């Protein structure tokens, strides 16, 4: 979808009004989505938004039509990330929309001076109207603002730049994602990103950036370039929970539920090893998936994610012979979000725990951890796309309560539809054909 025209117009007006004050604007976007014809997007939109998009006859031809307006303004830089894997015969053979499965820029971070908004939402119209999503505002936090401003600069230095005439240009051949030698480009990307993250890590380790109650830690995942900061830390924490926590409640939500095998193993181990632990899952109901009843092959996407949920519950049942007892005891709760006329795109992970100190039975202050950002915790997020999350860990009672309140909005009982493995297995609606289920392990690599 194209970004909100109102948002682009507001930004354009702000730049013009403040051109004499040295206002600087830097936009980093995904090239395949930004150049995709809007007519193609509208053709394959799901049923929830189909009528609205078809009636929007004034929609621009693509996001580039809007971005080009900004690129012509003083102080504005527009960069377009392009996966180095989308080149040559792959680029020629893969059609629009399918080509983004190779890898894309998926980070959603918005920096305004010392304020940062982190979330999983794009800026198209439906995100502001009929889509349940999630975002956090970090106000007056210069280190976090500096981090994302710097991250944008690093990725942009390895991306195309939108010129005033609408053409794309790379800074040099070595950083042209399509023309550069693949090995050289990947190594340059990895080296620059790791160097930046190492420098930031050293700066944020300074005592002046640490508090006793709350930690805010930005994380980056760029598996295509060997940078696995986010995924590695997530698995490390999940694997440590059974030994560190006196009790643990874990909540996981994604509009595109397809966790990696490692993450599934961690969740199963937590339930089996800690009888006082609970696991709460929330997925998009097929009807709340943005591709529901979409034309073409994309119409099968909601079914594929339903199959992914079934496969996860089957895996859990095999690993835990008493999974039915765990579910009936309330330690495992699985639900789908369904709200008529809305789609579900929220993603995140919450852990509430009381932490033991070493072998001591004396529990420290209860802590809450939450991850907010762009990742869906699947293989595509891990291996293909550029992702970023912020990990917030706090023992502050007020902040912990605010985090619970945010979670309660997402787990709204009015739109929560409980499901079980037995229920889902018996259904024939919203299921892939039996022969397609055999290739689900392959499909998961691009989901």
Image: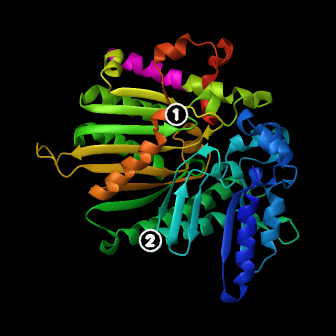
- Height in image: 26 above or below 124? below
Q: Position of residue 438 (x, y in %)?
A: 62, 17
Q: How is the image coloured?
A: rainbow
Horizontal side, residue 41 vs residue 158: left or right: right
Which residue is rendered at x = 51% and y = 40% of the image?
A: 377
Helix, strand or loop at disc 2? loop
**Viewer-closest of 56 and 355:** 56
Inspect this view and state whether residue 21 appears.
yes
- Cα distance in 3D space between marks 2 and 1: 34 Å
* Magenta segment main secondary structure: helix
Q: Which mark is residue 94?
A: none
Q: Quadrant of the C terminus?
A: top right
Q: Which residues are magenta?
A: 309-322
Q: Nearer the viewer, mark 2 or mark 1?
A: 1
Q: Which mark is residue 415?
A: 1
Horizontal side, residue 116 vs residue 297: left or right: left
Which residue is rendered at x = 64% and y = 55% of the image?
A: 186
On the image, numbered disc 2 is attached to which residue? 141
């Amino acid at each position: 979808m194209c970004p909100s025209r109102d948002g682009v117009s507001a930004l354009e007006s702000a730049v013009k009004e403040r051109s004499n004050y040295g206002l600087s604007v830097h936009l980093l976007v995904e090239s395949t989505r930004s150049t995709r014809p809007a007519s193609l997007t509208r053709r394959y939109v799901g049923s929830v938004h189909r009528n609205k998009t078809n009636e929007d006859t004034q929609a621009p031809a693509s996001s580039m039509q809007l971005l080009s307006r900004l690129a012509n303004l003083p102080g504005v830089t527009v960069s377009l990330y392009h996966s180095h894997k989308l080149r040559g015969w792959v680029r020629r053979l893969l059609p629009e929309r399918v080509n983004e499965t190779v890898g894309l820029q998926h980070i959603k971070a918005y920096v305004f001076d010392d304020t940062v908004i982190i979330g999983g939402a794009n800026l198209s119209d439906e995100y502001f109207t009929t889509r349940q999503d999630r975002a956090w505002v970090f106000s007056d936090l210069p280190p976090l603002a500096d981090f994302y401003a710097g991250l944008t600069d690093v990725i942009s230095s390895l991306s195309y730049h939108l010129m005033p005439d609408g053409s794309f240009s790379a800074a040099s051949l070595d950083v042209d994602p399509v023309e550069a030698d693949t090995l050289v480009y990947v190594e340059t990307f990895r080296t620059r990103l790791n160097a930046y993250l190492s420098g930031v890590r050293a700066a944020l380790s300074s005592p002046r950036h640490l508090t006793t109650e709350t930690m805010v830690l930005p994380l980056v995942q760029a598996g295509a370039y060997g940078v696995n900061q986010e995924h590695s830390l997530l698995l490390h924490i999940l694997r440590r929970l059974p030994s560190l926590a006196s009790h643990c409640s874990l909540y996981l939500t994604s509009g595109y539920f397809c966790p990696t095998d490692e993450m599934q193993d961690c969740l199963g181990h937590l339930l089996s090893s800690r009888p006082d632990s609970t696991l709460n899952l929330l997925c998009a109901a097929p009807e709340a998936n943005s591709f529901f009843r979409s034309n073409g092959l994309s119409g099968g996407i909601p079914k594929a994610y339903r199959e992914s949920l079934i496969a996860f519950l089957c895996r859990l049942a095999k690993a835990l012979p008493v999974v039915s007892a765990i579910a009936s005891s309330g330690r495992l709760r699985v639900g789908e979000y369904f709200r008529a006329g809305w789609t579900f795109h929220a993603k995140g992970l919450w852990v509430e725990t009381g932490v033991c100190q070493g072998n001591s039975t004396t529990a420290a202050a209860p802590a809450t951890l939450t991850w907010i950002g762009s990742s869906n915790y699947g293989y595509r997020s891990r291996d293909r796309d550029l992702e970023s999350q912020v990990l917030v860990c706090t023992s502050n009672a007020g902040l912990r309560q605010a985090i619970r309140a945010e979670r309660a909005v997402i787990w709204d009982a009015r739109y929560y539809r409980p499901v079980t493995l037995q229920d889902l297995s018996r259904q024939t609606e919203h299921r892939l054909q039996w022969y397609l289920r055999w290739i689900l392990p392959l499909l998961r690599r691009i989901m």
